[in-house]
Image (cartoon, helix red, strand yellow):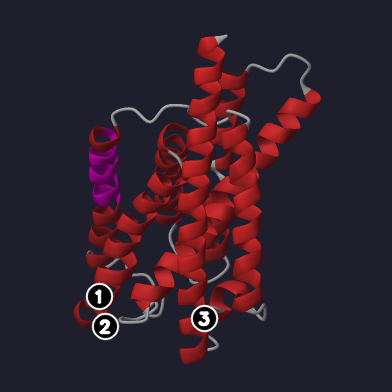
Amino acid sequence: MKMKEELRKNKLGIFNRQKSQYLWLSSLLTVLTSILYISDKYIFQKYMGKLNPLITIPIIATLGFFSLSFLVYKNWLSKYEENNLKYLFYSSIITVTLASVMVLIDLNKIVFSENINILFPKSLLFYPVIGFVAEIIFHIFPFTLLVLLAGYFLKNPNKNKIIWTSILIVSLVEPIFHIVDMASGRQYSFWLLGYMGIHIYLFNLLQLYTLKRNGFIAMYLLRMIYYLIWHILWGYMRLNILF
């Protein structure tokens, strides 16, 4: 009885902590969205079309909140947060390596479009916001949807198998999106498209495993590390080096 009470308190503690972290982050990013929209009302148009980001992003944040709350409270994510610093150090090294490989590919004349990045200094505000949106759309919502469907249709679901199957499937969403987008635009080689698919898939696997193990904020931080190198720093430098 005492052990069950301890587990319940531990689960509730993790739930409240992750909920608080998410609310603080989403509130900050809503403020950044407002600043960006006031300075340039078309800055989100490439990603959101004619949708108003001041309405769309809070809606996405709300969807993410309820999805993440379900995952944490129903124990679809880890109850424990062990070896955080050591794991985050190694996962950050992998993230830096992946982003650096993309820089090398671009540097060696397999050049992407000149206008693929939002320019500095707006990039400092834009990429934290769009990275948050990406995590909800590509990861949190589809992951929640899959485990809900599995729990509904399977009579005796194996939670561990469902989680890992969902990770493997959801990791495909973002690479498929980017490959379709690239293939419909400039003429990129088959080999580059293939590599990009594998590259993004591996990063998504790392992120979703981090979500399972360490929660949303840790997953989001990995994307921010990647974006800092590829979109913000290299996004500024590549215009002088390649064009």
Q: In which quarter of the image is the N terminus?
A: top right
Residues 77 and 157: in front is 77
Mark-to-mark CA distance, 2 and 3: 32 Å
Kind of residue at badge 1: Arg
Tell me where residue 94 appears, x and y as whole percent: 27, 43
Q: Name the residue under label 3.
A: 34
Q: Which residue is drawn at 61% across and 43% down?
A: 69
Location of residue 31 with respect to 86 vertically, above or below: below
Mark-to-mark CA distance, 2 and 1: 7 Å
- Marks 2/3 in contact by CB < 8 Å: the verdict is no
Residue 37 is left or right of residue 123, and the answer is: right
Location of residue 59 with respect to 202 vertically, above or below: below
Q: Name the residue under label 1.
A: 238
Q: Name the residue under label 2.
A: 243
Tell me where residue 79 appears, x and y as whole percent: 48, 27
User: How many other residues sit within 10 Å of disc 3, few (<14), some (14-19) or many (≥20)?
Assistant: some
- Tell me where the magenta segment starts and ends, as one range: 87-98
Residues 213 and 200: in front is 213
